[in-house]
Image: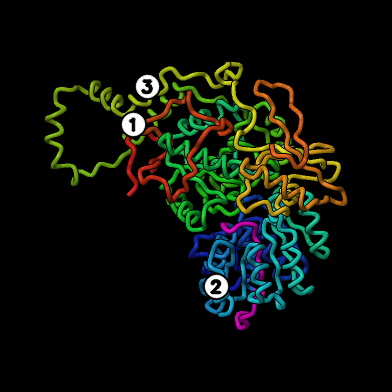
Amino acid sequence: MSTFLELGLKEPISRALTDLGYEKPTVIQEKAIPQIISSTDDLKAFAQTGTGKTAAFSLPILEILDPTQSNVQAIILSPTRELAVQIGNNIKDFCKYLKDVKVTTVYGGSSMEDQIRSLKRGSQIVVGTPGRTVDLINRRALKLGNVQWLVLDEADEMLNMGFKDELDKVLEATPETKQTLLFSATFPREVEAIARNYMTKPVEITSGEKNSGSDNVTHEYYAVTERTRYPALKRIADLNPDIYAIIFCRTRRETQEVADNLIRDGYSADSLHGDLSQGQRDSVMGKFRKKTIKILVATDVAARGLDVNELTHVLNHKLPDQIENYTHRSGRTGRAGNKGISIVLANGKEKGKLRQIERIIKKKFIEGKVPSGKEIVQNQLINLIDKVHNIDVNETQIGEFLPTIYEKLEDLDREELIKKFVSLEFNTMLKYYENSKDLNDLSSRDNSRARSTNDNMTRFFINIGRKDNLNPGKLIGLINDQNIGDKIEIGAIDILDTFSFFEVDKNFEDKTLEAFAANQPDFDGRSVNVEITKKERSGGGRRGGRKPFGKKDGGFGRRRSSENSSRSNDGGGRRSERRSSDRPKNSGDRNAGGFGRRRRER
């Protein structure tokens, strides 16, 4: 394997990489860096998440750009604020010894005036989200007439999020002579469309097989019902005392509810989703990186841009609507040479998606069994004993207290002392799991009975489907185009041959009907018709008719709620909508999976 100097990078860049702990280039870096330095050809690069794509495109740009010119020479687009900030910070680290190189990161949710001032001072590299980038172009604060490189990072996700118009506008503002660099971890049809529309005879390089999962990640699935989904999630966390994980959910509402439930049950958890302000998101991520929070519950947006290398697990509370996104989710673990586990909780309807994912990642899912109470207690107990055995004793600090301690314990022999110590730590846990049910028995009436749909969502019928070239990303874009509301929550999506179904937050039910009726949109020349459907009856009853278009239709604290009474996220009912900054200061600040007293956050 080459060194960074041998790839053609100047000494100041190599020195900065050494300071950051970079020793050898990854496979994608070995292939991409010399290609970009030596050629002006457009480039498609495909590599698994966590293999160093940011360095692969930014290092050669730093090598070639002219630091004496203050105009924008490279524009890098990313789908999310988190990923844009991460890329911008990484590039600033890479050019630590290139004093004349300036980087500006632009994204929504932060002061536009500050970003404009930074651009006026001069920046050779701009990293941005599509929406804010276009806003700055329209204000004539961002001028891209001298751009030499356009980087599209995770371009497929930008299309899925409905940014096609913004991409078109950015491309219109850049010269035809630019070099376009497309980097992605997956290779769906949408990426091919980008290459055809935005690139000229691109060179293609890959690291490993396209769309395949990392060799460092093991994939497991657990069979659940809606009633057992959340209890199974807790048991998996409890079985792994040192868990450091992201739990992925499909919607913001589901994300907040799962996080609230975990916090209520004593886990060190918090949520990350689009309803949080940028300040709240930064605060949550800061705590997660410091491991003050051990479990992060997040939407798929968080799959693009979380730079955390030590995750032990990724848990899929529900599978994503677009199965390609599973690759991005699972790629959050098993990074930087570490091993990781990606776990899917799947009910009967969702199991079919597992076969599709296996074909994409070219790996088989291992079927796991939801752990029993006895297994969890044994794992936690052994973990505690190992920690006691390996702890370093500071004789200087505790020496003066030892005589009193020895005196109080002198009537206990070794066996009695061990029994009392274990009982003190584990009585709560033992009682909690004393009569726990077997969650793997899905035929049990207690385990299988649950509402089949989310009472907080309204299900809509739409008269276009797979034969109209509809996919979830295009449907989300069509819904967003109706300007129903900034905070609209889109739930489950089912694309069928000639029609489809989608769920929308019940609060936007009337607005959705009114918007489609007023706008009368079409899709590829076909008039769109949207109607409310009646929900399926629980217990597998026959589907009702549709309403006509336009009418209204681990860790254990000393307190632990009963596992059997825990709600699934589809169970309806009232729940807390508190944001992370609004929560009580004593909520959840403890290590997930570890047993003991709840610690107050200071």
Q: Nearer the viewer, residue 143 or 338?
A: 143
Is residue 178 part of the magenta span, yes or no?
no
Q: Position of residue 527 (x, y in %)?
A: 85, 48
> Mark 3 is on which residue type?
Lys
Picture residue at 73% right of the left edge, 70% below the top: 38
Q: Which quarter of the picture shows residue 71?
A: bottom right
Magenta-highlighted residues: 64-82
Picture residue at 69% right of the left edge, 56% below the top: 158
Q: Position of residue 377 (x, y in %)?
A: 41, 25
Residue contact between numbered discs 1 and 2, judged by CB atoms under 8 Å? no
Is residue 217 shown left or right of residue 415? right
Q: Nearer the viewer, residue 524 or 543?
A: 543
Q: Which residue is mark 3?
A: 431
Q: Which mark is residue 558?
A: 1
Relative to residue 499, is residue 284 depicted above or below? Answer: below
Q: Which mark is residue 113?
A: 2
